[in-house]
Image: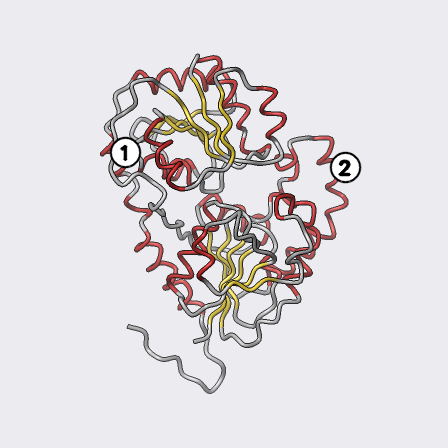
Amino acid sequence: MRTAIVHDYLSQRGGAERVVLAMAGLFPDAPIFTSFYSSDLTYPDFAGLDVRTSSLQGSIDPEHFRRSVLRLPGVFARLDLSAFDQVIVSSSAFAHHIRHRHSMVYCYTPPHFLYDTRAYMGSRARAGLTRPILAPMRRRDRAAAARHCSYAAISRQSARQIRAVYGRVSPVIYPPLSTEHLPAEIGPMPLEPRAMVVARLLPYKRVDVAIRACATAGVDLTVVGLGPEETRLRRLATRGVTFLGRVDDSELAQLFRDHSLVLAPGLEDFGYGPVEANYAGRPVIALAGGGALETVEDGANGVLVEGWDVDRWAAAVTGALSRTWDPADLRATTRRFDADTFGKSLRQWVESTWEPPQGQVRAAVD
């Protein structure tokens, strides 16, 4: 069975890129097709894989790739994948615009850029101006989604969005927790309380809430991540806020050891942050909505906060720091997200979508 993997772009270090690496481990002979690839900006593991880029490679700035987002649907639609029996698409953007007779999509979310424009842009006015312009693109996007054999979602939150936007029913396959960048041994809580947020600096991540809440609570905050919101967030920050930008895996592992809790104020489709924090033995303060409802149990491995009221978030920070958390118990809550469970579920989904061409009989699978 000749398999290809297709992913939106490889220019970031995030959960989706870790999923692609896990897929490559499950299908080691499958090349990875993507719109463009920057070895300096994503995980070094991709350097040893068969990564094949589109005509966009070298023609856009990977640091500002969102400026070229309108070019992505056509680029993927023109990919020649005819040499492969099946194609597995990993997408939260436009990789699902590929054309193949037997393709399936592991979907993180329908593109926020198209369907949640206000949250993505962080401005009602800009979203209002942009939304009519994007209408033809949304129609084209829905048509692309209808062509695939099957969809799978990363969470129940994502499955609801896929059904609402694309009319597709999708099983939930939780993404695997990669632990190479997390502390192997669980360390004790630091003596000095300090909070951390790990996120791309985009409006819908609501890092501004974390900054204001920690200032109100009188707790120092470390911000890990890059994005177009950085300038605004730096202006908002007090002296107790440290911006680290992009960090490597060894640095991130040490940061988890050095911090008392992790904040996740964004409305996430799944959100690796809470699971990673729990594996590192740290509690989470997360928005009571979206993917966090599937990963955070209030009072057991973190605290859920309704809405984005800064005083509520500040009270949650103070309350979490006043509690005693058992780091080993926090790690134990992450077992259901292990790589073996993901691998078994993904293979079952891929196999269940396959219908052999007329006149052929599918070989039995052990």
Name the side, left or right, on which 24 lies relative to 211: left
Name the side, left or right, on which 14 lies relative to 234: left
1 and 2 marks in contact (CB < 8 Å): no
The residue lying furthest to the bottom in this view is 359
Q: Considering depth in this image, is 10 or 144 the residue closer to the camera?
A: 10
Rendered view: 17 above or below 131: below
Residue 290, numbered circle: none
Q: Position of residue 360 (x, y in %)?
A: 44, 85
Measuring 30% from the left and 22% from the top, which residue is drawn there? Answer: 190
State which quarter of the image contains the N terminus.
bottom left
Q: Amino acid at mark 2?
A: Leu
Residue 129, numbered circle: 2
Q: Position of residue 135 (x, y in %)?
A: 73, 48
Rendered view: 342 above or below 347: above
State which quarter of the image contains the C terminus.
bottom left
Q: Considering depth in this image, is 311 or 217 the residue closer to the camera?
A: 217
Q: Position of residue 160 (x, y in %)?
A: 50, 46
Q: Quadrant of residue 322?
A: top left
Q: Residues within 10 Å of mark 1 (few under 14, many from 20)?
A: many
Measuring 50% from the left and 35% from the top, which residue is drawn there? Answer: 199
Name the side, left or right, on which 325 lies relative to 172: left
Dot 1: element = helix
Q: CA distance from mark 1 to mark 2?
A: 45 Å
Measuring 34% from the left and 20% from the top, which residue is drawn there? Answer: 320
Q: Amino acid at mark 1?
A: Leu
Mark 1 vs mark 2: give the one in front.
Answer: 1
Q: Considering depth in this image, is 291 or 80 the residue closer to the camera?
A: 80
Q: Return the disc, 1 or 2, that comes first in the chain's sequence.
A: 2
Q: Quadrant of residue 347?
A: bottom left
Q: Which residue is mark 1?
A: 330
